Amino acid sequence: QVQLVESGGGSVQAGESLRLSCVASGSIFSINAMGWYRQAPGKQRELVAGITSGDSTTYTDSVKSRFTISRDNAKTTVYLQMNSLKPDNTAVYYCNAKTIVFITGGNSKYLELWGQGTLVTVSS
């Protein structure tokens, strides 16, 4: 079974920081891009930050210079360091990974994974 497990959400005051972590596990042959999405109440899910297998990064404009996405050396864990948090950053944050996984018969296939979501609440 392949899965993403997130941690690190919580409730903070505006201006404070949080660090989200997401660990991929299971029969994964390779992980290509990983990213963090968020969904605020009444809004669509949106990409917050992404990182490729070559460590190129992308951010939504509203978080540039405040959020940093990174991966560990094994490329199985992705982090989102969130600084100077604002109330409008309140949302459920989801980890995403675009993977190649092993299946029966020695074959593999593309599989997009999602974490269960972790709630970030920022109060003013």
Image: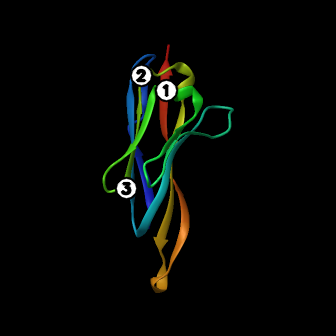
Quarter of the picture containing the N terminus is bottom left
Cα distance between the residues tagged 2 and 3: 27 Å
Circle 1 SS class: strand
Residue 41 in view: yes
Cα distance between the residues tagged 1 and 2: 6 Å
Q: Which marked residue is nearer to the observer: mark 2 or mark 3? A: 3
Q: Are marks 2 and 3 in contact (CB under 8 Å)?
A: no
Q: Nearer the viewer, residue 12 or 80?
A: 80
Residue at image point 43% right, 16% down: 15
Q: Residue 25, position in %: x, y?
A: 38, 61
Left or right of residue 72, residue 107 in this image: right
Residue at image point 38% right, 37% down: 8
Q: Residue 85, position in %: x, y?
A: 46, 22
Answer few, some or many: residues within 10 Å of disc 1's Cα (few below 14, many 20 plus, some between 14 and 19): some
Q: Amino acid at mark 1?
A: Thr
Question: Where does label 2 land, which residue?
Answer: 12
Q: Amino acid at mark 3?
A: Thr
Question: Where does label 1 land, which residue?
Answer: 121
Q: Nearer the viewer, residue 81 or 57?
A: 57
Report which quarter residue 10 is drawn in: top left
Residue at image point 53% right, 20% down: 87
Q: Earlier in the sequence, mark 2 or mark 3?
A: 2
Report which quarter residue 67 is drawn in: top left
Circle 3 SS class: loop
Answer few, some or many: residues within 10 Å of disc 3's Cα (few below 14, many 20 plus, some between 14 and 19): some
Q: Are marks 1 and 2 in contact (CB under 8 Å)?
A: yes
Residue at image point 43% right, 53% down: 54
Q: Earlier in the sequence, mark 3 or mark 1?
A: 3
Q: Which marked residue is nearer to the observer: mark 3 or mark 1? A: 3
Q: For the view shown, which residue lies furthest in the left direction?
A: 73
Question: Where does label 3 land, which residue?
Answer: 76
